Amino acid sequence: MGIEKQNGFKEEESEFLFPPDILNKLDFNKSPAVFRPKISASNPGEEWMVVRPLQRADYDKGFLQLLSQLTSTGNISRKLFDERFTQMKMSGGYYVTVIEDKRISKLIGAATLTVEQKFIHNCSLRGRLEDVVVNDTYRGKQLGKLIVVTVSLLAQELGCYKMSLDCKDKLIKFYETLGYKLEPGNSNAMNMRFEDSS
Ligand code: 16G
């Protein structure tokens, strides 16, 4: 099935936001995270699970419902989703990565790597870990670890000199086990909010 665009251009719903191969090549031995049992992006532990880039069709696979477990998503129409997907793909630097339960065609985990281009550090790149969410009915399958380590290794693979995140205080310990550190004197996240929510 395809989506008919206004300009008549047909885009496949299976279209990926970024090439999937790069995820399967990630070397999980490079991460300080300990997995018991051992799993990775290419071998997530269950044959019904897959770790892959976001697809256009994920609008129908509960992507937004999953994100709403993290924060407010607002009311996003298919058209709006589709436009944002296209913009992210065209601009590059957006690596929205998901875990799907293929038995029910539903997304059960997601995390985003965004890559910022810099002048500093010899025109380097900085990664940001964003919008990490796992469906809590899938507890005990190491999915939080799996999705965060996947995008963190991806940042390293893409040449980022560091990867940053902000999170709730209660999650600090979790991220520390995956290699993130509160840097002494340099660990504050500050926000200026321009809207209540939407
Ligand atoms: C957390 C998320 C951030 C997300 C924000 C949404 C991680 C590591 N951090 O800080 O990515 O955008 O929550 O909260 O997932 P907000 O709606 O209050 O901005």
Image (spheres, grey):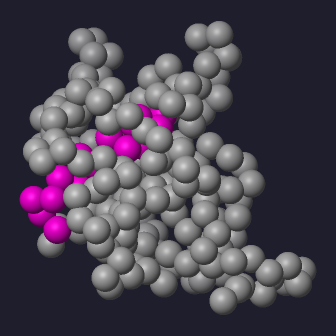
At 64% from the left and 22% from the top, the residue drawn is: 118
Q: Nearer the viewer, residue 24 or 31?
A: 24
The prevailing secondary structure element of the residues shown in magenta is helix
Q: Is residue 12 above or below residue 176?
A: below
The x and y percentages for residue 192 are 45, 42
Relative horizontal placement of residue 180, taking residue 139 as reference (left or right): right
Q: Nearer the viewer, residue 50 or 136?
A: 50
Residue at 31% in and 54% down:
43
Magenta-tinted stretch: 138-155
Identified at 28% across, 56% down, the residue is: 44
Who's the residue at 38% across and 82% down the image?
Answer: 105
Vertical arrangement, residue 184 with respect to residue 58, above or below: above
- Spot occupied by residue 123 in the image (x, y as percentages of width and height): 67, 16
Figure label count = 0
Task: Say above or below: 107 vs 162.
Answer: below
Q: Quadrant of residue 50?
A: bottom left
Image quadrant in which the N terminus is located: bottom right
Asked if residue 139 shows in the view, the reply is yes
